[in-house]
Amino acid sequence: MRIGHGYDVHKLVEKRDLILGGVKIPFEKGLLGHSDADVLLHAVSDALLGAAGLRDIGYHFPDTDPAYKDADSLELLRQVAKKIADRNYRVSNVDVTLIAQRPKVGKYIPEMVQNIADALGVTPDRVNVKATTEEGLGFTGNLEGISCHAVCLLEE
């Protein structure tokens, strides 16, 4: 068994779609990034890559490469899943904590879980997504950005 942890953060800006867990969420701001800036899927990807000893998402999909401009992070997660499988690992479970003051995302969580499960080729009961605020504190509390932590367990 191998455990991985992933963390990502992106700045909230005007004139961008807000994509979290592969779901477009109605909100007045979106996340700034080279790809679609899906902070949740980036944290999951980093957790999986870390558990497999495969560095991080920036190494595999650098923001200096125009091929990843506006990239769909669900597609990147599918590529990460292939890299994991190529090393003879399978995903036992993924647990995710999204940190955002707003928007409230509870009603979108089942779709996020299904998106992640589909991308990883696992059943939804192996994926958990939860969200919290920081009670108005820090950059997330001030609506400057959104962050996310993810942990995973891989098995050989």
Image (tube, rainbow, N blue to C red):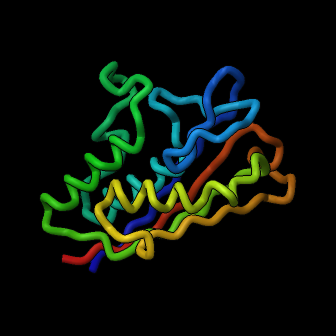
Q: In the rendered image of this protein, does residue 115 appear above or below residue 13?
A: below
Answer left or right for 21 relative to 30: left
Q: Nearer the viewer, residue 8 or 41?
A: 41
Work out which residue is located at the far bottom of the displayed protein and give it: 1
Residue found at x 29% / y 73%: 154
Quadrant containing the C terminus in the rendered view: bottom left
Answer left or right for 148 relative to 88: right
Q: Position of residue 97 (x, y in %)?
A: 60, 63
Q: Position of residue 36 (x, y in %)?
A: 49, 32
Answer left or right for 146 relative to 21: right
Q: In the rendered image of this protein, does residue 121 appear above or below residue 41?
A: below
Quadrant containing the N terminus in the rendered view: bottom left
Residue found at x 31% / y 40%: 59
Q: Position of residue 56 (x, y in %)?
A: 35, 49
Residue found at x 52% / y 50%: 21
Quadrant housing residue 110: bottom right
Q: In the rendered image of this protein, does residue 64 appear above or below residue 89?
A: above
